[in-house]
Image (cartoon, helix red, strand yellow):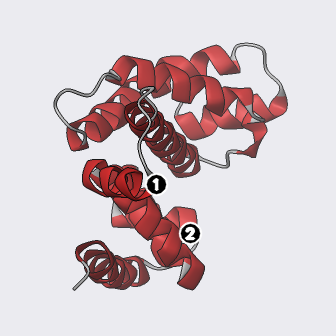
Amino acid sequence: MGTITEILVEVREGKDHAIEDLIKIAYPELRRLARHYMGLERPDHTLQATALVHEAYLRLVGKDCTDYRDHAHFFAAAARVMRNLLVDHARARLGVKRNGGIAIHLDEALTLADSERGELLELEEALKHLARFDVRQSRVVELRYFGGLTNAEVALVLGVSERTVKREWRMAKAWLYNEIRGD
C-alpha cells in the first residue's frame, strides 16, 4: 500500500485491491475530517462522526473514483460530500420540526424558520450567495473551513498560489461575516 495519490493511480488503472487499499489508508483521515465537522455542530447532534464517514465514503466511491487526481483532490471532494450531508441532515431536522402535524399560518412558519435556523444552514446559504459572485472564494472557504486543508493544499487543489489562497480566505471571511451578521 502506498500513498493516497499512488492508490488513486491504481484505481484509475483498474487494480482490484485499490479500492480496499484506499479505505484502509484514507479512513483515519476521513475520521479526522468528520470529527472536525462534528466539532462545529451543536453538542446534541444526532449524526455521529462514524456515520458521517461511512456515508461520505459510500458517496465518494459510488461515483467514479477515477476522477480524483491526488490526495488533496480526494479530500476536497470528501469535504464537500460531508458538508452536503450535514446540510441535508440540518434541513431534514428543521423540516421535521416545522411539519409536526400542527397547522400554523405562513407568517408564523416564517418566524419559526428564522428563529430555528442553524448556523450551518446560514453559512451554507451565505456560501451559495458568495459563489454567485466569486466561486474561488467560496471554494477556498469550503476547503479551508469544512475540509480542514492547509493553504498549500487548497492552492494545489485550485491551481493557484498560496498567497492567492491567503488573500481569498481573508476576503471571503470578511464577506461571510458581513453576510451572516448583517452588518
Q: Quadrant of residue 162?
A: bottom left
Outermost right residue: 14
In the image: residue 92, left or right of residue 12: left
Say which mark, if any, is on residue 106.
Answer: 1
What residue is shown at x 37% (from left), y 24% (from top)?
Answer: 28
What residue is shown at x 53% (from left), y 29% (from top)?
Answer: 56
Name the residue beneath numbered marker 2.
Answer: 158
Disc 1 residue type? Leu
Q: Is mark 2 on a helix, strand or loop?
A: helix
Quarter holding the N terminus is top right
Measured from the top left, where is residue 153 in percent x and y?
Answer: 43, 59
Query: Can you see residue 59?
Result: yes
Measured from the top left, where is residue 92 in percent x and y?
Answer: 48, 34
What residue is shown at x 75% (from left), y 45% (from top)?
Answer: 67
Label 1, residues with CA under 10 Å away: few <14, some 14-19, many ≥20: few
Measured from the top left, where is residue 125 in percent x and y?
Answer: 45, 63
Q: Please tell me whether residue 6 is drawn above or below residue 26 in the rendered image.
A: below
